[in-house]
Image (cartoon, grey):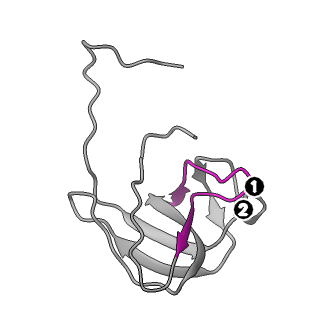
Amino acid sequence: MPIIGPGSTCRTYPVSRTLNIYEYTTIKDVEGWGPLYDGVNTKLVATCKADKEGFFQTEIKPGRYSIFICEGEKFYANSGDGYGGINPITVQADSVCYIVLKLDYAYY
């Protein structure tokens, strides 16, 4: 694996992107290969936009979902749950779900 050394010019910074939240999505429900998918074939539940600081929020019903970052015409998601689920999130009733998304073109 590549390692970022002390003299590296690589940096981390927030970006503004559109985010799509779908019903829980597995590798059987997408087109193409991750982390940059060509299509998502589950129901779109919500769309929101992260601001220039990367902050986003939306209201959705309790349940299991998958979140994708829109990158042009593609859908970026770089994590899984070990059961085929892509970028899964669980929303509980009367609570706030905190999630940090990384747009680094790596798959974890």
Q: Is residue 61 left or right of residue 86?
A: left
User: Would you place residue 22 above or below residue 62 in this image?
Assistant: above
Does the magenta-highlighted stretch encompass residue 87?
Answer: yes
Q: CA distance from mark 1 to mark 2?
A: 8 Å
Label 1's element? loop
Identify which amino acid the numbered label 2 is placed on.
Thr
Q: Residues within 10 Å of mark 2 (few under 14, many from 20)?
A: some
Label 2's element? loop
Identify which amino acid the numbered label 1 is placed on.
Tyr
Q: Quadrant of the N terminus?
A: top right
Q: Name which of mark 1 and mark 2 comes first in the sequence.
A: 2
Location of residue 99 in the rendering, given as x and y in whole percent from the top left corner: 41, 60
Q: Nearer the viewer, residue 84 or 42?
A: 84
The residue lying at 27 percent from left, 64 percent from top is 55
Q: Which residue is denoted by mark 2 in the rendering?
A: 26
Q: Residue furthest left?
A: 52
Q: Which residue is denoted by mark 1 in the rendering?
A: 83
Q: Residues within 10 Å of mark 1 (few under 14, many from 20)?
A: few
Contact (CB < 8 A) between labels 1 and 2?
yes
The residue lying at 61 percent from left, 54 percent from top is 37
Marks 1, 2: nearer the viewer: 1
The residue lying at 67 percent from left, 67 percent from top is 25
Q: Main secondary structure of the magenta part?
A: loop
The region drawn magenta spans 73-91
Location of residue 21 in the rendering, given as x and y in whole percent from the top left corner: 51, 73
Location of residue 71 in the rendering, given as x and y in whole percent from the top left corner: 45, 56
